[in-house]
Image (tube, rainbow, N blue to C red):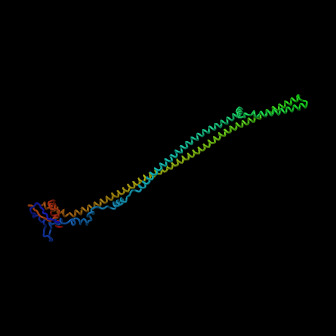
């Protein structure tokens, strides 16, 4: 809304020389009318904001947000991709692998410990069996030595008559005496018969009878010697058989002991083989656990690799988006500069009249006059316009011509 302000120019009245420039020339409304400074100022400053600036801004597209460069397609694409960006899938896959690897390694630690304990147990069992087998081997050596000694003793005893006597029957003589007595009786009967026959033949006491008696005694001695030799021979053979039987029984006992030791050794060897197989099984189990742990270690490496790939991918995506954003920002900055230039041009155009009035007022205040003058004029709400008419300097004729054209 226009207001009336009194402008003091330092003159008590407007000097006649510059009065036309303040009040205008001619009759208002006529064709030859040229408005003066005050009417022109009133015309310009009585306009509202929309008429002065707003409509022109809207018409040029520079009103409100129109003065701000909008995000270009590159920046919009960056925003869209940033909104859609998620945690790289490699992170999840790597985390799963790492979890599986960690759980698997923890489980295999217990399995490895079990296999290790099994191997230790088998080792202890094998050591015990080995010690027992060593003891049996020593016992077998002892029995073998005893068998060899028994064989040697038998060989010595077989040729030792005193040793043979130990095995002969102590009742041998008692067994021979009845036989010898019977032989004496029988040969006594034979001698008696021969003496009877000799008596009947008239040869008793002769050489023939003596020969017969000598032959009979010789035959009795031979028979008795044969009986004694046969008895002792039989006794010797029986003693030898008894001696051999005892030695055989001893050797058989030793052989049986050796066979038992051999069987025990075989059992121990079988146990040692089973223990060795158990230890091999435990080693195979440990190797399997080691293979599992190697697989889990590989999974951990794969997880780390996936994490690195995910990080690299994310960094690459962010770097690409940063480059796009920087390019978009540069393009938008250029667009903003164009908008700012257009806006400044429009502002210069819209305020050009006010600037010319200010320049004209400066010229008028610079014209020498003889007395002070003051006047009242209807102006726009800006209270500083009247004081602005007191400053500046420009060409009076050019300014006057400009307003005449206006």
Which image quadrant is residue 404 in?
bottom left
Front one among 27 and 156: 156
| Quadrant (top left/top right/bottom left/bottom right) for the C terminus | bottom left
Residue 2 location (% of width, % of height): 16, 66
Vertical order, 396 against 264 (above or below): below
Horizontal side, residue 153 vs residue 302: left or right: right
Vertical order, 164 against 315 (above or below): above
The number of discs equals: 0
Furthest residue to the right? Answer: 202
Residue 154 location (% of width, % of height): 68, 35
Q: Residue visible at 73% across and 37% down?
A: 238
Q: Residue visible at 37% across and 60% down?
A: 84
| Quadrant (top left/top right/bottom left/bottom right) for the N terminus | bottom left
Front one among 380 and 264: 264
Q: Can residue 48 be seen in this view?
A: yes
Q: Residue visible at 55% across and 44% down?
A: 125
């Amino acid at each position: 809304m226009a207001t009336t302000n009194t402008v003091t120019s330092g003159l008590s009245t407007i000097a006649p020389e510059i009065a036309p420039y303040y009040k205008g020339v001619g009759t208002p409304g006529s064709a030859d009318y040229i408005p003066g400074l005050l009417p022109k100022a009133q015309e310009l400053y009585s306009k509202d904001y929309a008429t002065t600036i707003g409509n022109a801004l809207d018409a040029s597209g520079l009103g409100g947000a129109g003065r701000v460069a909008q995000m270009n397609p590159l920046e919009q694409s960056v925003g869209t991709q940033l909104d859609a960006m998620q945690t790289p899938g490699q992170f999840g896959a790597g985390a799963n692998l790492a979890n599986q690897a960690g759980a698997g390694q923890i489980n295999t630690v217990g399995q490895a410990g079990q296999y290790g304990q099994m191997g230790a147990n088998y080792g202890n069992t094998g050591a015990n069996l080995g010690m027992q087998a060593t003891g049996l081997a020593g016992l077998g050596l002892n029995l073998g030595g005893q068998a060899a000694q028994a064989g040697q003793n038998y060989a010595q005893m077989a040729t030792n008559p005193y040793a043979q006597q130990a095995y002969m029957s102590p009742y041998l003589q008692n067994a021979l005496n009845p036989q010898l007595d019977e032989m004496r009786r029988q040969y006594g009967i034979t001698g008696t018969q021969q003496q009877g026959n000799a008596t009947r033949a008239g040869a008793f006491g002769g050489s023939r009878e003596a020969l017969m008696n000598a032959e009979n005694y010789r035959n009795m001695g031979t028979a008795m010697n044969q009986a004694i030799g046969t008895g002792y021979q039989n006794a010797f053979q029986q003693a030898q058989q008894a001696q051999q039987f005892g030695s055989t029984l001893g050797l058989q006992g030793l052989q049986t002991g050796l066979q038992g030791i051999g069987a025990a050794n075989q059992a121990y060897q079988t146990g040692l083989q089973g223990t060795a197989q158990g230890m091999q099984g435990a080693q195979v189990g440990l190797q399997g656990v080691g293979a599992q742990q190697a697989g889990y270690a590989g999974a951990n490496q794969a997880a780390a690799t996936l994490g690195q790939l995910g990080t690299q991918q994310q960094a690459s995506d962010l770097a690409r988006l940063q480059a796009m954003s920087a390019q978009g920002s540069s393009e938008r900055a250029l667009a903003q500069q164009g908008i700012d230039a257009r806006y400044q041009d429009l502002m210069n155009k819209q305020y050009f009249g006010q600037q010319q009035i200010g320049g004209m007022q400066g010229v008028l205040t610079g014209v020498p006059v003889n007395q002070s003058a003051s006047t009242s004029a209807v102006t726009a709400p800006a209270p500083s316009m009247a004081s602005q008419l007191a400053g500046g300097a420009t060409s009076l004729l050019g300014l006057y011509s400009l307003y005449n054209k206006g």
